[in-house]
Image (cartoon, rainbow, N blue to C red):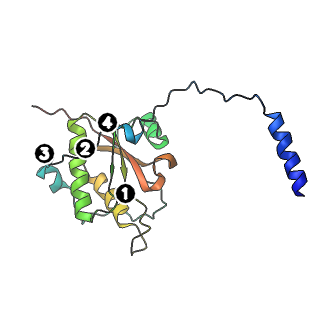
Amino acid sequence: MTKKQTNDDFSSFKAAIKGVKPIKNDRIDLYAHPENTRPFKDNSQYHDEATHAHLSDEWESPEVSGEEILFFARPGLQFKAQKQLRQGKIIIDDHLDLHGLTISEARETLLEFILFAQKQQIRCIRLVHGKGYRATTEKPVLKNKVNSWLRQHPDVLAFASAQPKDGGAGAMYIILKNVDFLG
């Protein structure tokens, strides 16, 4: 194909779409974009020894790869809610990014964030754990730890790997149990 033919094709295409207007979308966007969520900054009041004691670094779930899709749901969670979680159709109320943290820092921050979210009556959060590309081991360390910790946490009802727009296999959506706090 010569350059003249390419220019002729482009001119023809440009003439064909002249006056075309974009279609307006009439669908409601259920996705609360992370920049619109509240930041998790002051975590000094969200330390709960009782919950921390339940999570063990010794208990391990089967190791997963960086690209592996995760899913976990406790018995009793409706199938429709599980499907919406996997599809990323549940509104994300807040998010947390664990990149750059050590294992102990990530564990502490995650547990404090879950307690914070429950006190704020937040139902669904997005957690970014990464895929472990910078890890010195074959398997992603933080992703595997988070997978293990969340399965042990009594207030986590379900989690699923995020949709590509939210981080894909390097992030997850988490549904938390509603807990009523007194005072």
User: What kind of element bears circle 2?
Assistant: loop
Label 3 amino acid?
Answer: Gln
For label 1, count other residues whose C-alpha is less than 10 Å away and answer few (under 14), some (14-19) or many (20+): many
* Disc 2 packing (10 Å; few <14; some 14–19; many ≥20): some
Query: Which mark, by number, is residue 155?
Result: 2
Query: Looking at the image, do the residues carrying marks 3 and 2 touch, with CB atoms under 8 Å apart?
Result: no
Residue at label 3? Answer: 45
Q: Quadrant of the C terminus?
A: top left
The residue labelled by disc 4 is 123
- Image vertical order of residue 25 relative to residue 10, above or below: above
Label 2 – label 4 distance at C-alpha: 11 Å
How dense is the environment of label 4, judged by Cα within 10 Å: few (below 14), some, or many (20 and up)?
some
Report the residue at 24% width, 58% height from top.
Answer: 107
- Contact, CB < 8 Å: mark 4 with mark 1? no
Residue lying farthest top? 26
Q: Along the polypeptide, which appears first: circle 4 or circle 1?
A: 4
163 lies above or below 132: above
Q: Position of residue 13 (x, y in %)?
A: 82, 40
Q: Please name the residue shown 39% across and 75% down the image.
A: 136
> Does the image show residue 63?
yes
Q: Amino acid at mark 1?
A: His
Q: Earlier in the sequence, mark 2 or mark 4?
A: 4
